[in-house]
Image (cartoon, rainbow, N blue to C red):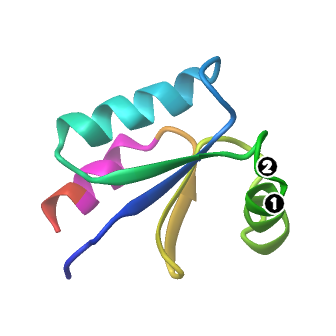
């Protein structure tokens, strides 16, 4: 499986789990795009209404592979892909 770009939905710079997630993704060489859901209502709707998450960060690899929170196990998994 080839992963193009991961999307990390965050709640801004004060979110420590968001920062940890982005730092580990960067260290592991995983390319990602950050979307601050506080500034983008449509992104917040997607994360909450469509994906069902209420905790940041939300990491979306593809429509079937996504999670919420700081999950180094998932980051390791996608970094190996």
Kindly state the secondary structure of the residue where label 2 is placed. Answer: loop
Q: Report helix, strand or loop for mark 1.
A: helix
Q: Residue at x 51, y 81 (%)?
A: 64
Give the image location of residue 81, x and y in percent. Answer: 17, 68
Q: Position of residue 18 (x, y in %)?
A: 53, 32
Assess disc 2: are there few (<14), some (14-19) or many (≥20) residues with their C-alpha within 10 Å of its C-alpha: few
Question: Which is the main secondary structure of the residues drawn in magenta?
Answer: helix
Question: Around disc 1, counting alpha carbons within 10 Å, would you say few (fewer than 14), some (14 to 19), or many (20 or more)?
Answer: some
- In the picture of the structure, the residue carrying the numbered disc 1 is 48
Above or below: residue 25 compared with residue 1: above
Residue 2 located left or right of residue 53: left
How far is disc 2 from disc 1 in space, using C-alphas? 6 Å
Residues 66 and 31: in front is 31
Q: Foreground residue, 25 or 52? A: 25
Q: Residue at x 24, y 50 (%)?
A: 76
Query: What residue do we see at 72% from left, 69% from top?
Result: 51
Residue 54 bears which disc, if any? 2
Left or right for 39, reference 32: right
Residues at circles 2 and 1 in contact by the CB criterion of under 8 Å: yes
Q: Position of residue 22 (x, y in %)?
A: 40, 36
Query: Between 4 and 79, which is closer to the camera in this rendering?
Result: 4
Numbered circles on residues, count: 2
Q: Is residue 3 above or below residue 45?
A: below
- Residue 72 highlighted magenta (yes or no): yes
Q: Residue at x 65, y 29 (%)?
A: 12
Q: Earlier in the sequence, mark 2 or mark 1?
A: 1
On the rendered image, what quadrant is the N terminus found in?
A: bottom left
Looking at the image, residue 58 sits to the left or right of residue 34; the answer is right
Magenta segment range?
71-78
């Amino acid at each position: 499986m080839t992963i193009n770009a991961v999307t990390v939905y965050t709640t801004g710079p004060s979110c420590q789990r968001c920062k940890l997630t982005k730092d580990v993704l960067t260290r592991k060489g995983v390319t990602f795009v950050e979307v601050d859901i506080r500034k983008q209502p449509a992104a917040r709707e997607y994360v909450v209404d469509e994906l069902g998450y209420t905790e940041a960060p939300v990491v979306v690899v593809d429509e079937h592979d996504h999670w919420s929170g700081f999950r180094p196990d998932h980051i390791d998994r996608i970094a190996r892909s």
